[in-house]
């Protein structure tokens, strides 16, 4: 029963994070890139083969698509002389629906082609990092398209 409460707590933290109003900062650009670089470094340390590498490209691409959709429904506005970004219930729904779809596609690809998996055990977190990096990069791309001035202003100032 404690696993159920832990899952509910994690879900509440995710909901809060998705709906929270956050100031636009340079870290919105740098964090996903650093996350992706660290994940790629971990892939190289784990000895990922070409098949699993292609799987990680798929995970990143699906994450970026989700991020693009989320970026379409995120609000950017000026509050107290500061640009802020706020999620919405639509962005939360996109994320919740995308999770099982992305992992179904990823695991189907690996299972159907019988690809040896190296990202398990101590490296089991790497696909999650790659997926999160894809989502964040996709969201930044869409926000830059929709709100170029506030986004570029945030990128140039910290």
Image (cartoon, rainbow, N blue to C red):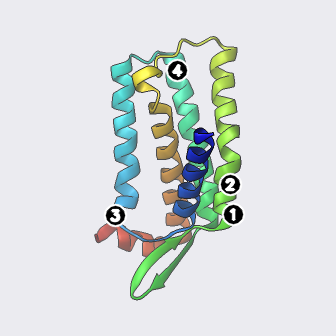
Q: Give me the C-alpha separation between circle 3 and circle 1.
A: 25 Å
Which element carries disc 2, helix, strand or loop? Answer: helix
Q: Give me the C-alpha separation between circle 4 and circle 2.
A: 26 Å
- Whether pointer 3 and pointer 1 mark residues with C-beta atoms closer than 8 Å, the reply is no
Label 4 Cα crowd, 10 Å radius (few <14 / some 14-19 / many 20+): many
* Numbered disc in front, either 3 or 1: 1
- Whether pointer 1 and pointer 2 mark residues with C-beta atoms closer than 8 Å, the reply is yes
Q: Which residue is mark 3?
A: 26
Q: Quadrant of the C terminus?
A: bottom left
Question: What's the mark number on residue 90?
Answer: 1
Mark positioned earlier in the residue sequence (3 or 1):
3
Is the residue 69 above or below the residue 89 in the image? Answer: above
Depth check: 151 or 87 in front? 87
Question: What's the mark number on residue 94?
Answer: 2
> Which residue is situated farthest in the left direction here?
158
Q: Give me the C-alpha separation between circle 2 and circle 3.
A: 25 Å
Q: Which residue is mark 4?
A: 52
């Amino acid at each position: 029963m404690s696993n159920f409460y832990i899952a509910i707590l994690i879900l509440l933290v995710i909901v809060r994070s998705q709906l929270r109003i956050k100031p636009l900062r340079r870290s919105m650009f740098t964090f996903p890139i650093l996350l992706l670089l660290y994940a790629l470094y971990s892939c190289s340390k784990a000895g990922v083969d070409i098949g699993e590498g292609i799987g990680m490209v798929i995970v990143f691409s699906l994450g970026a698509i989700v991020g693009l959709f989320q970026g379409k429904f995120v609000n950017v506005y000026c509050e107290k002389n500061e640009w802020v970004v706020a999620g919405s219930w639509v962005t939360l729904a996109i994320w919740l629906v995308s999770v099982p779809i992305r992992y179904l596609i990823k695991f189907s690809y690996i299972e159907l082609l019988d690809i040896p998996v190296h990202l398990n055990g101590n490296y089991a977190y790497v696909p999650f990092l790659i997926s999160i990096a894809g989502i964040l990069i996709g969201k930044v791309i869409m926000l830059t398209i929709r709100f170029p001035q506030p986004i570029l202003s945030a990128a140039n100032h910290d």
